[in-house]
């Protein structure tokens, strides 16, 4: 209870209402701005995620291609190694240069065109001639 001699404060309800409304409007505006910024950040994040997923898919596809190429190259190298081993085995079974030279020498010695062979009749006549001369 207020005493009659005390000064009573007058409350300006319209001023308070106006101030509260002004502050509520300001807070609403700020919240809308924050929501818009949050939506923008969310869109950017979603775009980044989509880009990252697309790039990961591209990288995966490229890695698969590289793996296939490496596998193909490895298979070809294995084939080449096998072929080289086969060629080396064949080379070990072939004649060496010195053996070929030796064979050439034998062929030259036994070549009927270059060598002079004696027929049986010629040998018998020569022997008969020698026997007659020594007898």
Image: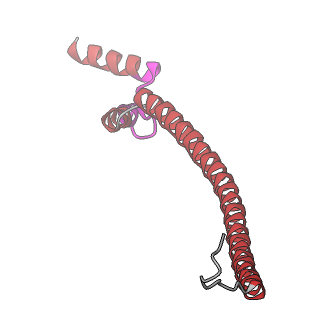
- Magenta segment includes 110: yes
Look at the image and give the residue range highlighted in magenta. Answer: 106-122
Residue drawn at x 45%, y 23% as measured from the top left? 119
Relative depth, front residue between 108 and 46: 46
Spot occupied by residue 71 in the image (x, y as percentages of width and height): 60, 42
Outermost residue, front side: 4
Location of residue 73 with respect to 16 vertically, above or below? above
In terms of image quadrants, where is residue 131?
A: top left
Spot occupied by residue 124 in the image (x, y as percentages of width and height): 40, 16
Outermost residue, top side: 135
Quadrant the C terminus occupies: top left
Relative depth, front residue between 130 and 44: 44
Residue drawn at x 71%, y 74% as measured from the top left? 31
Left or right of 108? Residue 39 is: right
Location of residue 64 with respect to 24 vertically, above or below? above
Relative depth, front residue between 132 and 84: 84
Spot occupied by residue 49 in the image (x, y as percentages of width and height): 68, 61
Spot occupied by residue 60 in the image (x, y as percentages of width and height): 65, 52
Outermost residue, left side: 134
Q: How many numbered discs, if any? A: 0
In terms of image quadrants, where is residue 110?
A: top left
- Magenta segment includes 96: no
Residue drawn at x 27%, y 18% as measured from the top left? 130
Residue drawn at x 42%, y 24% as measured from the top left? 122
Left or right of 39? Residue 68 is: left
Left or right of 117? Residue 83 is: right
Relative depth, front residue between 121 and 40: 40
**Colour pattern:** secondary structure
In terms of image quadrants, where is residue 1?
A: bottom right
């Amino acid at each position: 209870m207020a005493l009659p001699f005390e000064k009573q404060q007058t409350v300006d309800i319209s001023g308070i209402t106006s101030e509260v409304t002004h502050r509520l409007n300001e807070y609403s505006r700020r919240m809308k701005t924050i929501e818009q910024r949050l939506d923008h950040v969310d869109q950017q994040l979603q775009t980044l995620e989509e880009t990252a997923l697309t790039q990961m898919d591209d990288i995966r596809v490229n890695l698969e291609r590289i793996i296939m190429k490496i596998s193909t190259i490895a298979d070809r190298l294995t084939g080449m190694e096998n072929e080289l081993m086969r060629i080396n085995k064949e080379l070990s079974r072939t004649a060496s240069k010195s053996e070929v030279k030796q064979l050439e020498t034998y062929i030259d010695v036994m070549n009927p065109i270059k060598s002079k062979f004696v027929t049986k009749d010629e040998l018998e006549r020569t022997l008969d001639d020698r026997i007659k001369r020594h007898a």
